[in-house]
Image: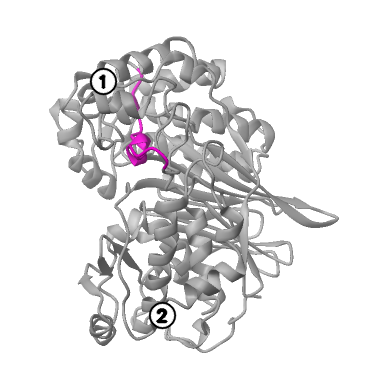
Amino acid sequence: MFPGEGASVPTTRRPDGGGRSTVFGIRGAVACEHPRAALAGIRALDAGGNAADACVAMAACLAVLAPMTTGMGGDAFLLFYEARKDGPGRVLGASGAGGAPRAATIEGLRDLGLSEMPVRGGPTVTVPGAVRLWEDAANRLGRMPLAALLEPARELSESGFPVSEVVARYWEAGEGLMSGSEAAASAFLPEGRAPRTGEIFRQPDLARTIAAVIEGGADAFYGGEVARSIARSVGEAGGLLSEADLAVHETLWVEPISTDYRGTRVYEIPPPGQGIAALQILNVLEGFDMRSLDPLGAERAHLEVEAKKLAFRDLHEKIGDPALAEVPTGELLSEGYAAGLRARIDPSRAGPSVSPALGDDTAYLCAVDEEGNACSFINSLYMGFGSGVVAGGTGVALQNRGTSFRLDEGHPNALAPGKRPLHTIIPGLMTRDGDLCAVFGNMGGPMQPQGHARIVGNLVDHGMDPQEAVDHPRHFHNDGVLLLEGRFPREEVEALRGLGHDVAVGPDYAVATGGAQLIRVLENGVRACGSDPRKDGCALAQ
């Protein structure tokens, strides 16, 4: 039981009882942002697969169903809870973050007249790590062959699918970018435009690429004709990614970082991911009596935003690839450091802001199987359709993850050959006394650490059920502006303005606050799922 459960607290449920209900299951559960992908996850479990298998199957389907947010040309991360019959399980982490091209240097980009990284185009393309992670997750953690897990995605891309409303809106927003090259337009703009809601979209080029990986494994993506097309297309767009860069890429198996929040241990992937910021926010908030605050109140939001500002200052000043930069992870997560940050927060006044903008398109998904294994998984192209570069004849849009590098020698996140950039995508996982509590994630670039901290607070401090926890109104602080979803009470909005926050009020379910998925394991072993309406989320359980 989480602290705070059973307490009398305000909820976000509509007075008429409308909205989604928590989904319950006994043998397994999945949650993601599209019903067809969720179905592939459930079918993987039904076929004898485990949580990792289900997540790989869902990730591959989402690469087809939401091609502007995720895909084979992006990166992926996972946290895996390995259940044990003779005691508490253990948490494993895998980083599918690709590095910068070996030929990429600060001097080289400056010679091109660049003083900072571009947002789109060939120079922003780093090695896509997702496909290698899919294979490694299936081989090391799963029970099913990769080929079986990818078959639903291949069939979807070949036979086609009706485009959903949310995806259609994202697609239309990317029309200008995709019309910039013949390969991109051919792959994603049939008839010269984005497909509209309900139209059937087929991807024969992507189907062939997935079929190649089904036949030859991830090596068929990182070598051969697919790799040649990727390298050639990036080069034509002014980038430096080579076939050799692709050939040497490997998934990194990492030790997750974690913190204790009121007796619940929260896990994240270590730097260069921004999961460390989520943990820092929680460390700061633990020193306040958050449980006594109105869950929709200005006081709670103020403390969360002020903790976020301090954590993000560290994120953008001190975090980079620990293989090539000095990153003080242990210090940043220490109790003493959190106490120092906490002392800088004025409960009665907003402090100075810091929050450089980051990308905003991601797909998060999760699964828990019958044996209690759990997988928290995230896959992304970074910004919508990534770099805008599509590898000709493959249907693969390539990420623009390199845009987050700094062209500033000495900075932890400075561009360097083979270096992994500061990363936004972060899967979350929670345990209590070593037992699995929940897997969860929130989408939306710099929203993710803020969303993680609020979801954890919803569960731990306010005793919310999974659906309520992801439905609960969110705030998003970025570039000095505090965006509140429209469901925040008007008096609390004005109270935040009175504290000095520059507040903007969005719609009831603001897309900028990011969709979320959550599966929680109850004390009786029942899997309880929450899935977010902000991105057409879907939860299924056995």
Q: Position of residue 515 (x, y in %)?
A: 38, 57
Q: Position of residue 230 (x, y in %)?
A: 37, 18
Residue depicted at 74% across the width and 67% down the height: 433
Q: How many marks?
A: 2
Identity, as a three-letter code, of the amino acid under mark 2: Arg
Q: Nearer the viewer, residue 326 or 40?
A: 326
Q: Position of residue 300 (x, y in %)?
A: 41, 80
> Which circle's residue, 2 or 1, is located before the other in the chain?
1
Which residue does the numbered mark 1 point to in the structure image? 238
Which residue does the numbered mark 2 point to in the structure image? 300
Identity, as a three-letter code, of the amino acid under mark 1: Gly
Left or right: 191, with 244 as reference point: left
Q: Nearer the viewer, residue 92 or 141?
A: 92
Residue depicted at 32% across the width and 49% down the height: 358
- Magenta-drawn stretch contains 163: no
Specify the farthest residue to the front: 410
